[in-house]
């Protein structure tokens, strides 16, 4: 199939060429990366200010190691989140949009998992220092459980809703109209 041919998938309501679809998918991915980058950059900035606080010297050995791991993790997430921009720039005008979209999608999922782990670690770190090590474990565990629920239950629920809609079943919101 030539790139200028219009393609559709059943019932998606779009009439776009493969290049148009890749452009749209690329733009959607870039919007998602912008959201991710904002959150991780704020967290990285927060972490980088901590050594300059007076109470930082009160950290125990575990907290120092955890802190340094979180800094490295935040930097890695930020670098990975910038990778699609770098790839786009290096492959600009080389007709590699399909490969860029696929790579960016994989990188985004890796970044989202890593950011979830980063947030778990930050909650563990803060609660461990402010309240107690036990509170840190409980709070970090709670955030980890929430992340797992969002990553597993959320997509399943949305797929079921989509499948029910495809079969013509009324949605929960249709009775509220």
Image: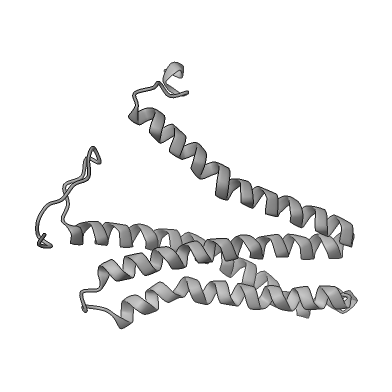
- Residue 77 point in image, percent of width and height: 56, 71
Left or right: residue 41 versus residue 59 is left
**Of the pair 52 and 95, the residue shown nearer to us:** 95
- Residue 52 point in image, percent of width and height: 77, 80
- Residue 18 point in image, percent of width and height: 19, 58
Q: Seen from this angle, which residue lies furthest bottom?
A: 90
Left or right: residue 110 versus residue 101 is right
Q: Is 149 placed above or below 103 here?
A: above
Residue at 32% in and 75% down: 88
Q: Quadrant of residue 159?
A: top left
**Of the pair 41 and 171, the residue shown nearer to us:** 171
| Quadrant holding the N terminus | bottom left
Q: Is 149 placed above or below 25 here?
A: above
Left or right: residue 66 versus residue 43 is right
Residue at 23% in and 37% down: 11
Q: How is the image coloured?
A: one colour
Q: Is residue 49 visible?
A: yes
Q: Is residue 131 visible?
A: no
Left or right: residue 94 versus residue 116 is left
- Residue 151 point in image, percent of width and height: 56, 50
Residue at 46% in and 64% down: 108
Q: Is 132 placed above or below 66 here?
A: above
**Of the pair 18 and 47, the residue shown nearer to us:** 18
Residue at 66% in and 48% down: 146
| Quadrant holding the C terminus | top left
């Amino acid at each position: 199939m030539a790139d200028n041919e219009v393609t559709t998938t059943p019932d998606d309501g779009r009439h776009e060429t493969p290049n148009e679809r890749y452009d749209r998918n690329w733009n959607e991915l870039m919007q998602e990366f912008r959201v991710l980058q904002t959150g991780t950059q704020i967290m990285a900035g927060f972490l980088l200010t901590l050594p300059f606080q007076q109470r930082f010297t009160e950290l125990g050995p575990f907290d120092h190691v955890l802190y340094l791991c979180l800094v490295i993790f935040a930097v890695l997430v930020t670098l990975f989140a910038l990778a699609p921009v770098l790839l786009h720039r290096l492959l600009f005008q080389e007709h590699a949009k399909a490969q860029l979209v696929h790579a960016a999608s994989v990188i985004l999922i890796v970044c989202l998992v890593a950011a979830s782990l980063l947030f778990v670690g930050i909650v563990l770190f803060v609660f461990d220092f402010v309240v107690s090590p036990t509170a840190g474990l409980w709070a970090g565990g709670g955030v980890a459980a929430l992340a797992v629920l969002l990553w597993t239950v959320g997509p399943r629920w949305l797929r079921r809703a989509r499948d029910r809609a495809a079969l013509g079943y009324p949605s929960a919101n249709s009775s509220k109209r």
